[in-house]
């Protein structure tokens, strides 16, 4: 196992731990009843399954593929095709999920009863995301995969020039569409919040600052896909796959870290869960009780 794969495994395992922790926290902590957190949980679940699907590409398209992987491929050759299909599927699903998060912020800022509607229909929204992602993925041309016994690695067969041109236009169109949609919904959300909180200066500034950070973070992270697409033509196939795996990891883990860094409710919940804080709180309660009884240490 080379150094890049080891690094990917280390930061991947750490990030997955945080993903699972955030999912459990947002699902079972009574503090998180707002529909925004239901959407976040769905987004993290999509990102988690996407991360799992990156591993076939990380392992197969490099020299020295383990014999066990070759045996699996020879017995079930359709598995590599499924993983290849899921790579494009998750590109759409991740992108649309990010747009759903942005749309949730915008609609919630505009309509007061939006929370109740989102809690009722968010599963249907994500069912639509999955159905659309499966449907639109069928239009791209996939390269066939075969094993090079001399190099001991899997390689991709070339597609025709017309298919390659179609794939390039397809990817550029959706990269651009998703990036512009995320930026527009982020800007509209900030404007809507400005209008609603115009009379609440302090609260206005704090909320706008948080929303601005989240919007910028989402836009910057998603722009990595567009940067990869623009630069992948200058890379070899192996390097392009390596770079795509790295970018996919960053996008997959981004929501978890954005929530951990920017969400104040999560910060409050984490503070309540720290044992030393509980211990200090207990000492403080005893100290206050002693003072009330006229006893000083």
Image: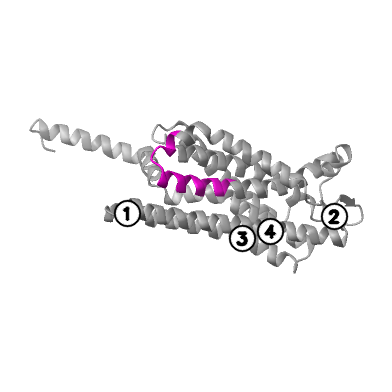
Residue 181 position within the rendered picture, expressed as x and y whole percent measured from the top left: 56, 55
Circle 1 residue: 204
The residues tagged by marks 1 and 3 sit, at their Cα atoms, a distance apart of 30 Å
Q: Which sits earlier in the primary sequence, circle 1 or circle 4? A: 4
Q: Are marks 1 and 3 in contact (CB under 8 Å)?
A: no
Query: Residue at the location (47% across, 58% down)?
Result: 187
Image side of residue 138 versus residue 44, left or right: right
Kind of element beneath mark 4:
helix
The residues tagged by marks 3 and 2 sit, at their Cα atoms, a distance apart of 25 Å
Mark 2 crowd level (few <14, some 14–19, many ≥20, 10 Å Cα): some
Q: Are marks 1 and 4 in contact (CB under 8 Å)?
A: no
Kind of element beneath mark 1:
helix
Location of the C terminus (image quadrant): top left
The residues tagged by marks 4 and 2 sit, at their Cα atoms, a distance apart of 27 Å
Q: Are marks 3 and 4 in contact (CB under 8 Å)?
A: no
Mark 3 crowd level (few <14, some 14–19, many ≥20, 10 Å Cα): some
The residues tagged by marks 2 and 1 sit, at their Cα atoms, a distance apart of 54 Å
Image side of residue 104 versus residue 64, left or right: left
Mark in front: 3 vs 4: 4
Q: Which sits earlier in the primary sequence, circle 2 or circle 1? A: 2
Mark in front: 1 vs 4: 4
Mark in front: 2 vs 1: 1
Circle 3 residue: 224
Q: Main secondary structure of the magenta part?
A: helix
Circle 2 residue: 155
Q: Which sits earlier in the primary sequence, circle 3 or circle 2? A: 2
Residue 173: mark: 4
Residue 55 position within the rendered picture, expressed as x and y whole percent measured from the top left: 71, 47
The residues tagged by marks 3 and 4 sit, at their Cα atoms, a distance apart of 15 Å
Q: Are marks 4 and 2 in contact (CB under 8 Å)?
A: no
Q: Which residues are magenta?
A: 97-116
């Amino acid at each position: 196992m080379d150094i890049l794969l080891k690094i990917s495994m280390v930061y991947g395992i750490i990030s997955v731990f945080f993903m699972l922790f955030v999912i459990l926290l947002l699902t079972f902590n009574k503090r998180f009843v707002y529909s925004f957190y239901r959407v976040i949980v769905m987004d993290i679940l999509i990102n988690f399954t996407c991360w799992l699907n990156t591993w076939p590409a990380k392992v197969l398209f490099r020299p020295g593929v383990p014999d066990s992987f070759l045996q699996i491929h020879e017995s079930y050759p359709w598995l590599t095709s499924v993983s290849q299909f899921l790579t494009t599927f998750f590109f759409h699903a991740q992108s649309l999920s990010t747009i759903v998060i942005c749309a949730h912020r915008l609609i919630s800022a505009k309509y007061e009863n939006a929370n109740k509607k989102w809690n009722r229909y968010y599963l249907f929204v994500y069912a639509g995301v999955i159905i659309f992602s499966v449907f639109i993925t069928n239009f791209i041309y996939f390269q066939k995969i075969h094993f090079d016994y001399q190099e001991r690695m899997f390689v991709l067969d070339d597609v025709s020039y017309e298919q390659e041109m179609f794939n390039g236009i397809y990817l550029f169109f959706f990269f651009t569409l998703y990036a512009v949609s995320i930026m527009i919904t982020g800007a509209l959300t900030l404007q809507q919040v400005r209008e609603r909180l115009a009379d609440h200066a302090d609260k206005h500034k704090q909320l706008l600052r948080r929303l601005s950070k989240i919007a910028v973070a989402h836009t910057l992270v998603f722009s990595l896909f567009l940067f990869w697409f623009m630069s992948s033509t200058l890379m070899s196939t192996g390097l392009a796959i390596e770079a795509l795996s790295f970018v996919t990891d960053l996008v997959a883990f981004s929501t978890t870290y954005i929530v951990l860094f920017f969400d104040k409710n999560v910060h409050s919940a984490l503070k309540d869960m720290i044992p030393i804080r509980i211990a200090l709180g207990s000492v403080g309660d005893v100290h206050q009780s002693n003072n009330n009884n006229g006893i000083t240490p």
